[in-house]
């Protein structure tokens, strides 16, 4: 049975650990963690890590900066600007470095090496960067081709109907077939009136359902999630909030939790549902 609870975001999990989650989201996050042991284990690991860091370095954050590193003293000392700059960096580290480490996202620290869902996201990002710059051949089969949906569905192993991003001023250009870690993968490409491109990557991935997870690489980024033995990745320019909106829209459409936005459709611009119908 498909879990239709909308996945919480990576930011919400961190906010929950830090005690900064809005009250109206706490019940939803706690319910999510009860039914998703992988995320619950990550949250527990983050808490243990934060406690260990505070125990080791907590007093350092409140220590007085040594008099010899007082910036006014340094400026009066007659040292050259390079030495002063180095000292200022040292002060910045003492005052903010430990606090910054305690406050930083722990996603990279606790991510499992060789996590298949992370590997899938990296593959999707690599494909995105490779194909978005193509002018004449950005896709293998255009959106107007009637065999696009049945072809990719047959190869990926599930009935596909593609995300409708018209509400974001994005039009489906078409798609292509790619090799994936666990079998064939489908890559769909969307474009807006300004020429900005978004890709949507789908591949079989027999892993527990996971929440949204954000990745960046150069000037692009991606959000991935896993549900019902398939992994999904939305990739595009490194605008976290917009990618999160696209990912949530795709998830809700795929799970039939929200209808696609109203528009004038053509037969080449299908509605979304991985279940078909």
Image (tube, grey):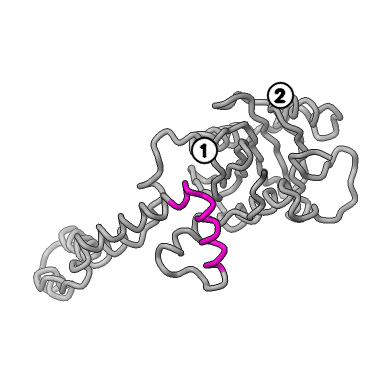
In the rendered image, which residue does mark 2 sit on? 155
Find disc 1 in the rendering and name its residue.
Answer: 117
**Of residues 160 and 173, the one drawn nearer to the viewer in this rendering:** 160
On the picture, is 12 further left or further right than 103? right
Q: Nearer the viewer, residue 99 or 2?
A: 2
Q: Quadrant of residue 261?
A: bottom right
Looking at the rendered structure, the secondary structure element under dot 2 is: helix
Note whether 250 is above or below 27 in the view shown: above
- Please state the extent of the stretch shown in magenta in the rendering: 25-40
Picture quadrant of residue 232? top right
Whether residue 41 is situated above or below residue 152 in the rendered picture: below
In the image, is residue 5 above or below residue 234? below
Left or right: residue 53 versus residue 107 is left
Q: Residue at x 47, y 46 (%)?
A: 38
What x and y, as percent, mark residue 130?
59, 32
Image quadrant holding the N terminus, namely top right
Cα gap from disc 2 to disc 1, whole angstroms: 20 Å
Q: Residue at horizontal 23%, vertical 67%?
A: 95
| Left-right relation of 199 to 62 | right
Magenta highlight on residue 244: no
Residue at the image position 49 percent from the left and 42 percent from the top: 217
């Amino acid at each position: 049975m498909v879990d239709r609870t909308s996945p919480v975001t990576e930011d919400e999990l961190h906010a929950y650990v830090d005690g900064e989650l809005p009250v109206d989201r706490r019940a939803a996050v706690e319910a999510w963690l009860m039914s998703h042991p992988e995320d619950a284990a990550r949250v527990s690991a983050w808490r243990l890590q934060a406690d260990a860091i505070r125990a080791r370095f907590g007093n350092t954050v409140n220590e007085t900066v040594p008099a010899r590193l007082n910036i006014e003293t340094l400026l009066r000392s007659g040292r050259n600007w390079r030495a002063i700059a180095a000292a200022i960096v040292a002060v910045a580290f003492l005052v903010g470095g430990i606090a910054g480490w305690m406050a930083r996202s722990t996603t990279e620290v606790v991510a499992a090496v060789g996590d298949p869902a992370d590997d899938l996201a990296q593959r999707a990002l690599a494909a995105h960067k490779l194909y978005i710059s193509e002018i004449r051949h950005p896709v293998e089969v255009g959106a107007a081709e009637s065999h696009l949906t049945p072809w990719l569905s047959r190869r990926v192993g599930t009935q596909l109907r593609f995300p409708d991003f018209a509400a974001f001023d994005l039009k489906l250009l078409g798609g292509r077939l790619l090799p994936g870690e666990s079998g064939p993968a489908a890559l769909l490409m969307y474009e807006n009136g300004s020429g900005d491109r978004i890709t949507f990557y789908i591949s079989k991935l027999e892993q527990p359902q996971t929440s949204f997870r954000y990745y960046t690489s150069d000037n692009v980024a991606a959000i991935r999630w896993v549900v019902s033995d398939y992994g999904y990745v939305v990739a595009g320019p490194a605008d976290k909030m917009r990618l999160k909106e696209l990912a949530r829209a795709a998830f809700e459409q795929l799970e039939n939790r929200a209808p696609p936005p109203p528009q004038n459709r053509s037969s080449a611009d299908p509605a979304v549902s991985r279940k078909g119908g």
